[in-house]
């Protein structure tokens, strides 16, 4: 799902870098199964990942990609 309008039920309403109100958002699941939201700002092109229903903090690279340990 991709869209360019902010939504009250999703994290990352405004770009954390430039404050732009529009972005491309894609819902998906992280490697551990948690629902996540990829957000790409249309103005400054900053990208971030957020856990849906999380605390609103951007996810770390390890959380996005999963553990590299077998």
Image (tube, rainbow, N blue to C red):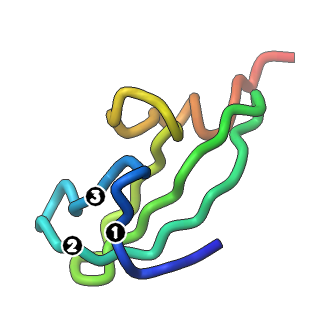
State the separation of the CA atoms marked 1 and 3: 6 Å
- Residue 40: numbered disc: none
Give 52 or 39, whichever is nearer the viewer: 52
User: Residue under circle 1?
Assistant: 6
Q: Earlier in the sequence, mark 2 or mark 1?
A: 1
Q: Are marks 2 and 1 in contact (CB under 8 Å)?
A: yes
- Percent x, y of residue 45: 32, 75
Local packing at callout 1 (Cα closer than 10 Å; few below 14, some 14-19, many 20+) is: some
| Left or right side of 57 for 20 | left
Residue at the (42%, 51%) spot, across then down? 10
Give the tally of numbered discs.
Answer: 3
State the separation of the CA atoms marked 2 and 3: 7 Å
User: Residue under circle 3?
Assistant: 13
Q: Determine whether 67 is above or below 61 in the image.
A: above
> Where the C terminus falls, by quadrant?
top right
Mark 3: which secondary structure? loop
Give 70 or 36, whichever is nearer the viewer: 36
| Left or right side of 22 for 48 | right
User: Residue under circle 2?
Assistant: 21
Local packing at callout 2 (Cα closer than 10 Å; few below 14, some 14-19, many 20+) is: some
């Amino acid at each position: 799902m991709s869209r360019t309008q902010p939504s009250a039920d999703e994290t990352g309403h405004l770009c954390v870098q430039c404050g732009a109100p529009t972005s491309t958002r894609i819902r998906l699941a992280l490697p551990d199964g948690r629902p996540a939201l990829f957000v790409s700002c249309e103005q400054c092109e900053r990208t971030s990942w957020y856990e849906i229903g999380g605390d609103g903090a951007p996810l770390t690279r390890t959380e996005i990609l999963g553990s590299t340990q077998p």
